[in-house]
Image: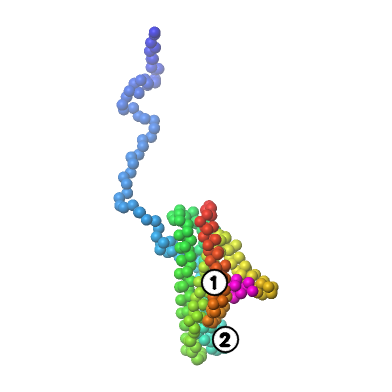
Amino acid sequence: MSTTTTHPVPGMPDPSTTARSPHAESPLPAVAATPPPIPGERPTRGVSFGRLVHVELRKMLDTRAGRWLVIGVGAAIATALVILFFVDGGQHPFGSYLQATTMPMAIILPVVGILAVTSEWSQRTGLVTFTMEPRRIRVGWAKFAASMLVGIAAFALAIGLAALAHQAAITFQGITPGWSIGGLVVAGAGLYVLLGLAQGVGFGMLFKNTPAAIVTYFALPTAWGILSSLVTWLDTAARWLNLDRTMNPLFLGKALTGEQWAQLATSVGVWVVLPLVVGMWRLSRAEVK
């Protein structure tokens, strides 16, 4: 058997010599050394619920839409108080001033609750939100809790502004003081504001679209109220399913009977609890883009 001897080509390196050379340069780039681990303890818990509520509060109020809504509420309240201050010489009880401050809040603040939910999809922040906190139900409850805190703070401010306006009318207009007010009137006004915010959050979760949620929130109860007033056989159902109608005795400070409490609970279940439950379910399963 003959052996073949390989002769190096002039001008080219000898392959056998190159393979055996321990100092030959590799054509592949050198791999960087693994960096040392970051010192300190690793986090063992997720984002706290209090932190989630704090973040949602900032997202509700520290945005252009949220600020303009708050400005709109303030302008509406100021207009209503100025009108009461000059009409009939400002001779109105404290309860009338309280209604003048709470009604604009009850109408406009639910939009803040809607935007707190729909902004995740309209402004496309949901990917960041649900990456930082994958447990979407906790995020949903944080939005709900933040909305309730906003409602409580707004109602406390409404009481203060109403008291200030009534005292100003006493001092500058010389009216007869009328500070007496029933506890049910205050409770009804506060509940009216909080239920409106909760309903707004529920509609926001249900539709996840700002225009659709806002239009449905205002149009559907209004259409139902008009329809029930025009159609006689719907009047009985409206006594149980019209939230404004079932809330009215409490807002006026009247003691509710057992049937009226049942009617109020039924209307709250249909217009507030049901949208929240279905909205939470949709929030946990919606595709985030």
In the rendered image, residue 237 lying in the magenta stretch gets the answer yes
Q: Are marks 2 and 1 in contact (CB under 8 Å)?
A: no
- Extent of the magenta region: 236-245
Q: CA distance from mark 2 to mark 1?
A: 37 Å
Does residue 12 appear left or right of residue 82 in this picture? left
Of the pair 134 and 61, the residue shown nearer to us? 134
Residue at image position (51%, 60%) is 280
Q: Point out the image quarter for the N terminus.
A: top left
Main secondary structure type of the part rendered in magenta: helix
In the rendered image, residue 88 lying in the magenta stretch gets the answer no
Of the pair 50 and 78, the residue shown nearer to us? 50
Q: Secondary structure at mark 2?
A: helix
Residue at image position (63%, 72%) is 237
The label number, if any, that marks residue 87 in the structure image: 2
Image height check: is 52 above or below 72? above
Give the image location of residue 207, x and y in percent: 57, 60
Q: Secondary structure at mark 1?
A: helix
Give the image location of residue 61, x and y in percent: 48, 66
Residue at image position (45%, 54%) is 134
Image height check: is 171 above or below 30? below
Residue at image position (39%, 12%) is 4
Does residue 202 appear left or right of residue 20 in this picture? right
